[in-house]
Amino acid sequence: MKKLLTWLLCLMMLVSAVPALAYTTGTYTGTGTGMLDKIEVAVTFDADTITGIEVVSCNDTPGVCDAAVEKIPAEIVKYQSLGVDVATSATFTSNGILEAVADAVNQAGGDVDALKAVPVEKVAGEEVKLSADVVVVGGGGAGLAAALTAAEEGASVIILEKGAAYGGNTILSGGYYQAAHPDYLQYASLTDGQKEEIERYISLEPKDERMASWQAKVKEQYAEHLAAGHEYLFDSPELHMIQTYDGGDYLGDSELIEMMCYGDVDSMNWLSDHGFTWKKKTVAIVGSIWMRCKASDTYASGQGFINVISDAIQNENLDVTTVFECRAEHLVKDDAGRVVGVTGVSTVDGTPYTVSANKGVIIASGGFSANVEMRQEYDEIWGNLTEAVPTTNAPTITGDGIVMAKEIGAALIGMGQIQLLPLADPVTGSTSNIIGEGTNMYVNQEGKRFVNESSRRDVLAKAILKQTGSYCYVISTFQNSRMDSDYKNNYHLYLTDLIASGAVVQADTLEELAEKIDRDPVELQATIDEWNAACDAGVDAEFGRDPEMMAKIDTAPYYAVSITPTLVATTGGAKRDTASRVLDWNDEPIKGLYEAGELGSYVANLYQNGVFLSEAMLSGRTAAQTAFGAVSQFEAVTKSENNGPAWADAADGVYTASVDGLHDKIEVSITVAGGKIENIEITGGRDSMLITDEQLAEYVGAIIASQSADVDIVSGATVDCQAIGTAIGQAFAK
């Protein structure tokens, strides 16, 4: 009897806890505020139930908002609650949908507060155990590049992505990619100011022998360029190296920088092979040191990189499994100290995961821009990176990979090198409101210029932070904007929508523009008159800006966009070598652990827009090639029918093959005698290889000594080692 009474009491409490909800039957349209624009939903009710929700309009970042659009309405209907969790990585869109549904509930006569109070109970399941050759932590650009590369080499891959969809920071980026690609140079003229810059870079005091070799090469290349009578922009991988090294205050690793600048064209071509199409116009944007940025001809922002790679994974039917909304927590090591897996937990219901890795774990989870505690702990530049400082990063970028690597003894580098981008909306922190190009003018609250607008972005950010209110306005016209003929910016947002949201101010006269942004019309007119005079004279006497990077502001309509610095990147993380292997405090590789993308960046304190995308692609591919590609491809191709090495069955003789190296064909000759490899020789393409004679001898010697491909790839020559291994495999396949 006592048990029965207890049960009845609990039942009564449960019933009383669930509100009796009532609605006026019908379909109602509600609106909410998303990341970039208003969100509109159509909600259908019967007398006591929400029966359906359709997202009618959502203009937030494609790819990012998709997870929220799919998840939030379904869960509201399932649980009959407005207390559902937001979609990880799509917080603004999720909250906008919830706000819009709440609006519709009000219209239908429902109790919004009661609906928010309805409990959503999710129970953790039993531990999920998975296994693959390669485990990738993070489904952004670097992680997807790693997954695709490994899978195409024949690996099984599992991606652990904390967000509800692919993308990470890549999908939120402006989509600019840095590479010194010769096919894209003839679309820009070589200006006098750029000539002076080239001479300056050649004349810099070299910081090391590697930089000196770059300078010597650029001097030779530039002389040939001028001797040939070329009037178009000069560029080369070596110039890119100098600019990257110098632009990062020489805090970057010169060996890693060299690898990136030689390899970014190869990654560019790799993307093209998978369907990525490029605009032929090379541009310079805010934060660019050189007119070298390239972008998709099809997609807005960084979405194209994510879409092309993820589509390739799906269309090629590769062995890639993704676990979304799963936060990686710890790395697993075996008794020998090799990393053999990852543990994680579902962010949806707390279900634990253990994922084993047969070949290696690749950390590609990004930095810690969205972790206020970490950025305040490590900041060495800015002084006060509180939650008041916005970030362009996804909310999932909280340093998980760094914490995991540190936990098992990885050396950390560059943790204090935190970068701000001076281009964010003061309200949302988004950069998608920008319509101006790098030729625009900045004015403060007094209506005056205060900085050379072509400066490094850290210089710009510090200058803006010193202004009243820590913001300024970018003044532009259509002629010097990023808008296309349909009046869309590079995020594919329409000017009319940006004006309607208040992100962009438009006026037919400068006086009207000054009034709309609450500036003194006389001061603003005087500032613009001085600007236009400097453009005509070809001399910016006040701030020393290159006149070639200035465009007159003299054609209505006029535009103003308010901007403030936003946290765009943390380049610190686990130290890595050129093979993307994570190193410990003794500079020894941690077996089975690799790294790609923003964390532990190649470039350290760098202020060049576009370089992070090229770094993401190359480092992701390199990590996969090291973890699985070169060795495994060699082994797979060279196995004989008796599962021994192919050369055990081969007749004595010389076997040859030719494969693509970093810059040219590499020809390899393998001598077999008595069922063993006796000699390996590079017979062609040697000049295009990065590997030194000593490194080559070490690598080839290790293969011959062990009669196995399972030898360490030479740090700094991953592509070369892969090419040699592939050539050996192809030679024996013949």
Image (tube, rainbow, N blue to C red):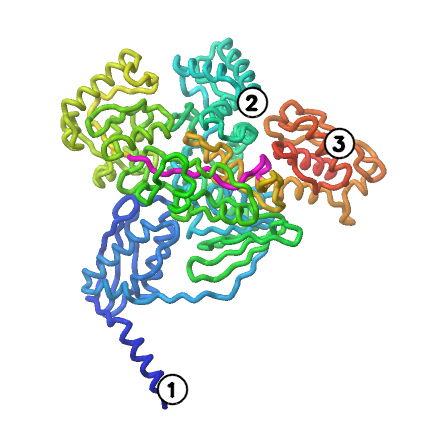
| Residue at mark 3 | 680
| Residue at mark 1 | 3
Q: Amino acid at mark 3?
A: Ile
| Residue at mark 2 | 208
**Taking 639 as reference, is 292 left or right?**
left
Front tag of 2 and 1: 2
Rate crowding at label 1 as few (under 14), some (14 to 19) or many (20 or more) other CA atoms within 10 Å. Answer: few
Q: Earlier in the sequence, mark 2 or mark 1?
A: 1
- Do the numbered discs 3 and 1 sit on residues whose CB atoms are within 8 Å? no
Task: Look at the picture and state if 545 lies above or below 733.
Answer: above
- The quadrant the C terminus occupies is top right
Report the span colored magenta.
564-580
Q: Earlier in the sequence, mark 3 or mark 1?
A: 1
Q: Amino acid at mark 2?
A: Asp
27 or 240: nearer the viewer: 240
Percent x, y for residue 345? 48, 58
Q: Is residue 576 magenta?
A: yes
Percent x, y for residue 510? 17, 25
Furthest-right residue in view?
674
Q: Earlier in the sequence, mark 3 or mark 2?
A: 2
Rate crowding at label 3 as few (under 14), some (14 to 19) or many (20 or more) other CA atoms within 10 Å. Answer: many
